[in-house]
Amino acid sequence: MEELLGEVIRKVKDSPGAEFADIFTPDVVSRLAALTEREYESFKVQLEAHLIMSGLSVPGMTEKKLDRLVQAAAERIDAERSKLPAVLLLEQCPGAPGGEGLYVPPGWYLSPDGVFRTDEAGVPSVRVCRSPLYVSAKVVDLERKKVFLQVTAHACGRWHSAAVPASLKGKLTAAAVKNMGVLVEHDGMLTEYIAEFLRTNWDGIRVVEAGLDLYAEFAAFVEDNIEKFRGNGGGKWGRFGKEENGRHYVAVVPEVAEKFARRQGTTLEYLLLALEESGKLLAGSRSRLRPTWFNGRTRRMVVVQLPEDAGQENDILRKEFLNEQER
């Protein structure tokens, strides 16, 4: 964007009085159309500031006129991108687990360096995220009658997968991917890529019938938001504690647990039932919510036993509890 901005400013300075069409040639407009929405808006703001400070102008130029030209060019580029061939995923990203028979949609490129949006010639032009990423399975949870998408990515030195609700859109999808350790550079384009990947591969994506481990997902949710549980007497979302028998637990505000449940495509009541059946819910005597001392008063909270196995994520939770006790 900075390079293109510099070229346009130089053309205006070198050709005083040049008309709009002389400055914004088809090539310049096409390059503007290839920018992200944020980059394009930044280009317009910076161009206007440079022109005002330099006492320059472009006869016939208006923001609406430029927007219309750029929008038309973007539609033309998208039409050309859609004509590109779909490429086998394993050709662009060899060794991707579960990638057999899947295709990278037209206009996109997958590599060990990430997911890229291409131009109309198929050349990678914008990096969407810094890890190869794709949908490897449709997970059908028969008990909840929900469908989840198994997203697979190479992040933090290894391939791993996570199930996200099929209904997730926009920023929620990007947030779920970021929780996998993927560095996302353009949230909107990531959503667009996943939507086009699903359209291209829907019938070829394998179906897996399995219930999700809500307890493991809940523990990961606490770990991902660990800052919200810190503080003297607890954090914004809850606190860590220890029972007389030595069991460590995390107490979570019900509204926060409900928010987690919605992201998993279920309800708070189902989450509590699943945690209870797994033996991890430390319920009250008359309710699945347990009265707990939190931030100077007693609140009914979702109290869940912390994992006892030696997994790295669980170690993080236990160490956080011990650090909290020391503070």
Image: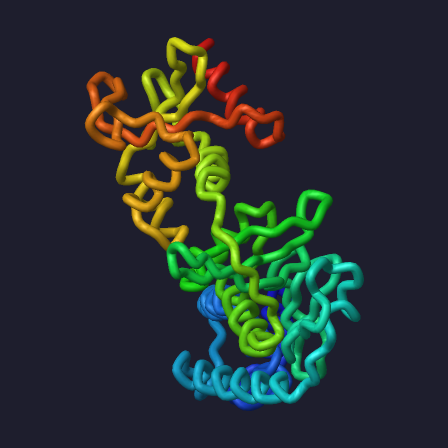
Against 181, is 300 above or below? above
Residue at image position (62%, 68%) is 6
**Residue 286 appears in the picture as rendered:** yes
Depth check, front residue: 59 or 55? 59
Q: Which percent across, then down, holds residue 263?
A: 39, 51
Q: Quadrant of the N terminus?
A: bottom right
Q: Which percent across, then down, holds residue 246?
A: 45, 12
Residue at image position (27%, 36%) is 254
Image quarter of residue 156: top right
Depth check, front residue: 252 or 60? 252
Against 278, is 315 above or below? above
Residue at image position (36%, 34%) is 276
Against 193, is 299 above or below? above
Residue at image position (44%, 81%) is 67
159 displayed left or right of 302: right
**Residue 23 appears in the picture as rendered:** no
Q: How is the image coloured?
A: rainbow
Q: Quadrant of the C terminus?
A: top left
Against 254, is 82 above or below? below
Depth check, front residue: 45 or 67? 67
Q: Which percent across, then down, holds residue 287?
A: 22, 31
Q: Which percent across, then down, holds residue 181?
A: 60, 46
